[in-house]
Amino acid sequence: MKKWIVAALALAALFLPINSRAEIETIGNYAWKFSVYRDETTIEKVFPSPSGPLTIPSELGGKPVTKIGWGAFAKCSSLTSITILNSVTSIGEKAFYGCKSLKSITIPDSVTSIGEKAFASCSSLMSFSVDSGNPSFTSISGLLLTKDGNTLVAVPVGLTKVTIPYGVTSIRKDA
């Protein structure tokens, strides 16, 4: 059993990014925990839990912020709105999970990937706003859809009535 655990750990180490580093940078009232790998910066967490409106910084550690990591803002219960700047290309799984006061989010044209349950349990969220130049996503009646309008990606949890737009042929798991 002991040999198996050592072998598993050694194998896992092979897949860890060699030149990735976790850092913390303070901007305004918040300490941003992030990692850098191949000149891409991923936000991992922010301390203390943000309240009110928040804008994602364009740079951390001198590198552009390109990803919002898994659960980076999970359970930030006083966060009311989030503005994501154009350097961000990816929003990770459960990135904003449980942000119960989150009412609005602006998704720029640079975001091409959104993880599952990225906005799950955001009970105050009433609509998504997507930049019209976004090549991957759009918003119709506040719903988040793929650009072609065929797949429903996410429904704002705060809505009590939803009409699926014409042309939707699939609904993403946990939408």
Image (tube, grey):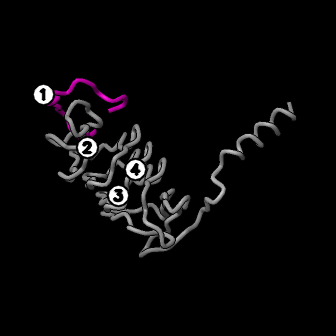
Residue type at mark 1: give it.
Answer: Tyr
- Looking at the image, is 53 positioned above or below residue 28? above
The extreme bottom residue here reads 28
Q: CA distance from mark 2 to mark 1?
A: 16 Å
Q: Which residue is mark 4?
A: 90
Which structural element holds mark 3? strand
Q: Which residue is mark 1?
A: 166
Q: Quadrant of the N terminus?
A: top right
Which structural element holds mark 4? strand
Pointers 2 and 1 in contact (C-beta within 8 Å): no
Q: Earlier in the sequence, mark 2 or mark 1?
A: 2
Q: Residues within 10 Å of mark 3 (few under 14, many from 20)?
A: many
Residue type at mark 3: give it.
Answer: Leu
Percent across and percent down for residue 124 are 27, 46
Residue drawn at x 60%, y 62% is 22
Which structural element holds mark 1? loop
Residue 43 is inside the magenta segment: no
Residue type at mark 2: give it.
Answer: Phe
Q: Earlier in the sequence, mark 3 or mark 1?
A: 3
Residue drawn at x 31%, y 61% is 86
Q: Which residue is mark 3?
A: 79
Q: Which residue is mark 2?
A: 137
Q: Is residue 142 left or right of residue 115?
A: left
Residue type at mark 4: give it.
Answer: Ser
- Looking at the image, is 74 positioned above or below residue 49? above
How many labels were placed on the picture? Answer: 4
